[in-house]
């Protein structure tokens, strides 16, 4: 960690003043909190890993579509600045840039859970010999419930066909060696490797390219849940070789509660005759309105769409992705490394008697999030969490004993990290 970090407000303010991305904070609405004098002040918002903040331009973007609806009715599909017929295509290039894919490989549609099921219809094709799905132990319920139901749907038992990758490192993180071991032992049984880009509880980032290469070497299909990775880490999905990926857009992509999700399908599958649950909007665009009885998929990820795009849900995503385009993922990652590094340094040098970071120390193995345990057990940790929330420092809690703090580089500051540390110190002395 850089020796230049200092636990002073002057130092933090100087870093914020020199930050080339500082102006982006003004493009977001920061939830207010009652200050010490009773007047509202900005809260310290570290919860972009759960729900990103609202870009100020979202209201105008959504209202514009409401205006077109009122003024044009059905003609809004073909008229207006961004005709609805092709609206999902207006987010495609920026979305591809954020996830490191070719435009043909990505689509904004549905929500994460729906997209995971749609992808497994195509990419989980079990046989009596190769029927298992590999997931991480303690995976997010969306993934666990989906894979269990898919296993049962195909007539297999989760007791035999669901393999859980156990953490083998201190604090519950998982080494690449653990993945290698389970594939060496059971790879011939595994039909699908489904792992996260970033593990939601520990904040550990996984090496997508290495995992994909290993899974493919054992004959497995490989997919990723990128809910906590998209907009957080610079991803290279095309180069990773992954067969598919899915994500939500309401966390680091700041697209609103329950926002539209996304999916990636590698271009080698673009025209493959894969089984799928077909829908009208996935039909070849050039002949879609001929209303023929036979389904012919649009090449690429668009071919997995079911229904016409939800315009009012896509508008916030379009606004957020435009912000990402101007900021640039590489610059955001550079700032993220500094912010999260500073937060970690504060914990280790100022709060080591109170807090323990469980997220990997290697910056290459994490994103913005630090998962933190409080010394003294769950009840003490819960007390600190509630104290922070009451004092306008917003993170989130994950059972059994983790506080997640995520400095998002689009709107968080060094000053915020210092405010967190000072609040923890104040609580510990009370």
Image (cartoon, rainbow, N blue to C red):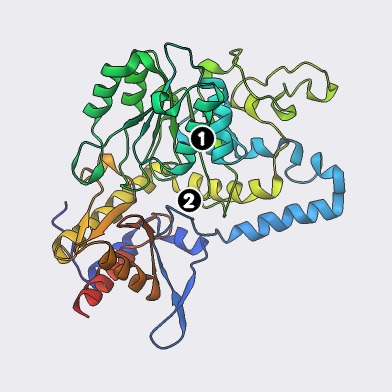
Give the image location of residue 382, x and y in percent: 32, 66
Residue at screen point 35% across, 19% down: 215
In which quadrant will I find the C terminus?
Answer: bottom left
Is 332 on the left or on the right of 73, as rendered? left
Q: Vertical placement of 167 versus 47: above or below? A: above
Residue 163, position as x, y percentages in the image = 36, 27
Q: Is residue 78 left or right of residue 308?
A: right
366, above or below 154, in the image: below
- Per the model, the C-alpha gap separating discs 1 and 2 is 21 Å
Give the camera-side residue of 273 and 401.
401
Occupied quadrant, residue 44: bottom left
The reply to whether residue 14 is visible in this rendering is: no
Residue designated by label 1: 146
Give the image location of residue 94, x and y in percent. Answer: 54, 39
Q: How far across and how far down the image is residue 137, in percent? A: 34, 37
Depth check: give the residue in front, 69 or 11: 69
Q: Quadrant of residue 66?
A: bottom right
Q: Which mark is residue 251?
A: 2
Q: Quick one: label 2, few (<14), some, or many (20+) residues within 10 Å?
A: many
Q: Secondary structure at mark 1?
A: helix
- Which of the pair 194/84 is nearer the observer? 194
Is residue 130 shown above or below 151? Answer: above
């Amino acid at each position: 960690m850089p020796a230049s970090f200092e636990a002073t407000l002057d130092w933090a303010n100087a870093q914020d003043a020199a930050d080339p991305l500082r102006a982006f904070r003004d493009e977001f609405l920061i939830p207010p909190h009652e200050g010490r004098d009773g007047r509202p002040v900005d809260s310290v918002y570290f919860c972009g890993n759960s729900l990103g903040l609202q870009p100020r331009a979202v209201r105008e973007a959504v209202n514009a579509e409401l205006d077109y609806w009122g003024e044009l009715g059905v003609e809004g599909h073909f008229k207006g600045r961004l005709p609805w017929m092709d609206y999902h295509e207006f987010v495609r290039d920026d979305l591809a840039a954020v996830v490191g894919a070719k435009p043909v490989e990505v689509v904004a549609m549905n929500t994460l859970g729906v997209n995971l099921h749609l992808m497994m219809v195509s990419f989980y094709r079990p046989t009596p010999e190769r029927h298992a799905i590999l997931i991480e132990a303690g995976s997010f319920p969306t993934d666990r419930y989906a894979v269990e139901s898919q296993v049962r749907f195909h007539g297999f038992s989760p007791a035999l066909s669901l393999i859980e990758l156990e953490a083998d490192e201190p604090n519950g993180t998982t080494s690449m060696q653990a993945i290698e071991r389970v594939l060496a032992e059971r790879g011939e049984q595994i039909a699908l490797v489904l792992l996260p880009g970033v593990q939601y509880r520990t904040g550990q980032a996984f090496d997508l390219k290495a995992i994909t290469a290993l899974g493919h070497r054992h004959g497995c299909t490989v997919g990723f849940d990128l809910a906590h990775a998209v907009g957080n880490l610079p991803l290279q999905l095309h180069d990773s070789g992954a067969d598919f990926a899915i994500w939500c857009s309401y966390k680091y992509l700041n697209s609103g509660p329950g926002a539209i999700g996304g999916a990636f399908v590698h271009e080698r599958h673009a025209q493959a005759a894969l089984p799928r649950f077909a829908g009208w909007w996935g039909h070849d665009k050039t002949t879609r309105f001929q209303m023929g009885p036979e389904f012919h998929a649009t090449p690429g990820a668009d071919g997995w769409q079911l229904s016409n795009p939800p315009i009012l849900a896509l508008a916030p995503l379009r606004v957020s992705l435009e912000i990402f385009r101007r900021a640039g993922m590489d610059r955001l990652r550079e700032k993220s490394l500094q912010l999260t590094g500073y937060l970690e340094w504060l914990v280790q040098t100022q709060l080591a008697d109170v807090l323990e970071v469980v997220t990997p120390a290697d910056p290459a193995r994490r994103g913005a999030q630090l998962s933190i345990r409080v010394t003294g057990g769950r009840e003490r940790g819960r007390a600190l969490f509630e104290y922070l929330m009451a004092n306008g420092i917003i993170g989130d809690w994950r059972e059994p004993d983790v506080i997640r703090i995520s400095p998002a580089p689009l709107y968080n500051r060094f000053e915020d990290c210092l405010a967190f540390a000072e609040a923890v110190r104040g609580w510990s002395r009370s």
